[in-house]
Image (cartoon, rainbow, N blue to C red):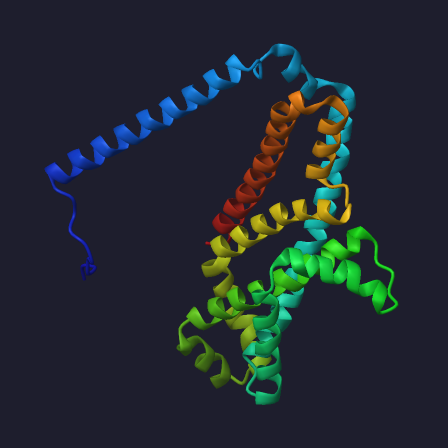
Amino acid sequence: MSATLLFDHPGPRARRRVWLFNVIALVAAALLAAGCLYALHQRGQLAGELWRVVLDGDFLALIGDGLLATLKVAGLGMALSVLVGLALMAGLMSRRRWVRLPVRGWMEVFRGLPLLLMIFFVYLGAPALGFELSTFWSLVIGITLYNSAVLGEIFRAGVVSVHRGQREGGLAIGLTQAQVLRIVLLPQAVRRMLPVLVSQLVIILKETSLGFVIGYTELLREGRTAVEYLGGQYSIPVYTAMAVAYIALNLVLSGIAGWLERRLR
């Protein structure tokens, strides 16, 4: 049976228009990039002595320390967010109203608060309650509170997207609700929600850069330290190196996700 199409295939004229718009966009982007490079050259920002700093041993050691600190927060934040998110998803899907409603309220509150505000609440609020938290744990807890609420909704949507016949079949063979969720629904839901899940994990990685506001020495703060030490003229080379590091980390995450997706097929 042929699939129902919700759009018409582009004809020759439409394809020519698409090709023309793509060419115009590429030319405009190239001109913009050339203009930026020319402006940087005119101001001496492309001088070799400025860019050689990114290969300096001390600079690379500083960036390596920041990268390691970023990965520690990101790795722990991802793991805790996934675990708490799964627990929230189970609460959302509970048949008991007294479980489902508080979980829904929890998620709406923490999804609605800005992450930066949450980090400040944890960092400044914990000592007021008698708990001494390091900048590391303040950042991890803030990231976990926010992203677990987001991931909980992602997990719930993934499970709900599985055909209801799968749930009914599991119950028919004597599985409990928890067993159906763990054995039947979640493995199928993971395949469907993997792209969205990876996107959220990439966001967590980038959110670690908010640690600089409470003094945590992650990658971005180490870059800022380097600029303060070397001088403002080194800002573009240093922050370009930061951008390359973040892009490389995100590409690694995307590669792992692609490998997992192929394995799960």
Q: Is residue 136 above or below residue 255?
A: below
Question: In this rendering, would 232 be left or right of 125?
Answer: left
Q: Quadrant of residue 17?
A: top left
Residue 207, can we see it? yes
Q: Is residue 196 above or below residue 229?
A: below
Q: Quadrant of residue 118?
A: bottom right
Q: Position of residue 240 (x, y in %)?
A: 59, 28
Q: Position of residue 13 (x, y in %)?
A: 11, 37
Residue at coordinates 86% horizontally, 65% vertically from top-left? Answer: 131
Image quarter in which the N terminus is found: bottom left
Count of numbered marks: 0
Residue at coordinates 55% horizontally, 15% vertically from top-left? Answer: 43
Q: Which of 218/175 is in front?
A: 218
Q: Give the residue furthest to the top.
A: 48
Question: In this rendering, would 214 be left or right of 237?
Answer: right
Q: Which of 171/141 is in front?
A: 141
Q: Is residue 70 above or below residue 27?
A: below
Q: Position of residue 207 (x, y in %)?
A: 63, 49
